[in-house]
Amino acid sequence: MLDQKLEEYAKSDIYPFHMPGHKRRMQMEVNPYRIDITEIDGFDNLHHAEDVLLDAQRRAAELYGSQKAYYLVNGSTCGLLSAICAATERGGEILIARNCHKAVYHGIELRGLVTHYLYPEITEEGIACAITPEALQAALQQYPGVEAVLITSPTYDGIVSDVARIAEIVHKKEIPLIVDEAHGAHFGISECFPESAVRAGADVVIQSLHKTLPSFTQTALLHICSGRVSARKIEQFLDIFETSSPSYVLMAGMERCIRMMTEEGAALLEEFFGRLTAFADKMKRLEKLRLLTKASFPGKSAYDFDASKLLIYTGDADITGKQLYDLLLQKYGLQMEMASGSYVLAMTSFMDTEEGFDRLAQALLSIDRTLKGNGSGQKGEQAAPFSVLYAPQEQLVTISEARDADHSIIPLEEAKDRTAADFLYLYPPGIPLIAPGERITGKTIRDIHSCCDMGLQVHGLLEEMRIEVVNFS
Ligand SMILES: Cc1ncc(COP(=O)(O)O)c(C=O)c1O
């Protein structure tokens, strides 16, 4: 049973190199059931905040420097849905980075938008790079009808785009820039980590507190930073997408987190950065595995990089990302955030202990000693699918048209030239290989096979390698 299983897990020695950022180490002074209330007298109403919750949200806005902040208890997901709907007309046009989270695609589907994409380059390790101002400029010229631009910065892997220059370009068109900063709630508080999109000039910024800070899962913030998107509209959409029973336990946790960051965030993040630097120094002793750092993303591939994301590259060794992930868990009790074909991601926060970092360093150094170099053969095999996986796809109809049309479920092998009715993506990181409305090509079919062969889970792929397609093609 889930509750008992979780209690057992809490007692185990497994160390969490994954979300949430509290790393299971925060304590509540009171039993959470004692403060789990509804909107009773004196405790305000999140959907019409005018008292204690209004003050709490003001403190969040002050911390990050936004005009207005909204507490979200349905994650960044409900913030993204609301921001997209508020910034566009129904059936309008939006320009998004292809590596956006599925919540962005869901917002697009609900609003019936025509989607144009910015395709980030993919490194040989299989990591999506930054969105460049040049690519943005070209896309805005190509698609003059775009009503809003949405990018993810930092990405799940920690790649940061030049939000300040991107915002400047977007604003010349007098349209808003929405930044999915779900993985960057720790930005803008200490100089050790990148600047937040809030201060870099974005118009709406969404941050998951739970991913990188000590806050309960599902807690997030939506910041309004300018008048380019109507706050009234955002509130109307939050009313739709967010529960009418926001948890006071979650909101109390958010207030504690914001207070902690306001009072001692800079010092905590600086200390944390010291631990990350010491860890990176130890990782210089690796011979086959490799810790990717800011220097691994030269030129325009990353404007900046979040050092709290530990990307351990396996492509120079005779081990895949998934095998390393399994070994770290099974032999060393270290639970990673995710495995990709040729790297493993450990997510860290300032709540990570010295002991946790030591355990990870020791484990990686021991594993590294047992590995053989890979030569160029296997490295090429692993990296190739990733470097070409997210190539532009031909759009036949919009996402919502494809979703609303009649569907059939057919074997993947027979899907060539049919129109996708569902998303196909690897989770993590949740970037679509193909979106509804796009033509399925022979290459896509081969790519999906490669991902399955590498042991990666392809979501949207049904039992017996079948997929959902639109009937009208
Ligand atoms: C880049 C990105 N954006 C948005 C989300 C959604 O955030 P939440 O889980 O807080 O709803 C995620 C979740 O993993 C994410 O990785």
Image: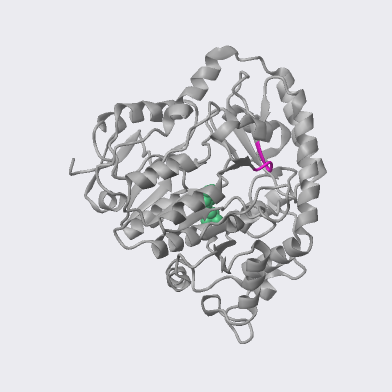
Q: Residue at x 63, y 58 (%)?
A: 209
Percent from the top left, x then y, of residue 326?
A: 62, 32
- Of residues 30 and 399, the one nearer the viewer is 399
| Res. 362 visible in picture | no
Image quarter (top left, top right, bottom left or bottom right) of the C terminus: top left
Instruction: Report the magenta stretch's main SS.
Output: loop
For residue 388, side relative to residue 14 (left or right): left
Q: Give the tally of numbered discs.
A: 0
Q: Residue at x 58, y 37 (%)?
A: 302
Residue that sits furthest to the bottom in the current view:
41
- Of residues 23 and 167, the one nearer the viewer is 167
Q: Is residue 4 magenta?
A: no
Percent from the top left, x then y, of residue 131?
A: 49, 41
Q: Residue at x 71, y 31 (%)?
A: 331
| Res. 445 visible in picture | yes
For residue 411, side relative to residue 358 (left or right): left
Residue that sits furthest to the front in the current view:
172
Residue 263 higher or lower than 200, as above or below:
below
Residue 240 higher or lower than 290, as above or below:
below
Please report the bounds of the magenta region as a residue range.
Answer: 306-310
Percent from the top left, x then y, of residue 404?
A: 25, 54
Percent from the top left, x then y, of residue 180?
A: 52, 53
Q: Is residue 308 magenta?
A: yes
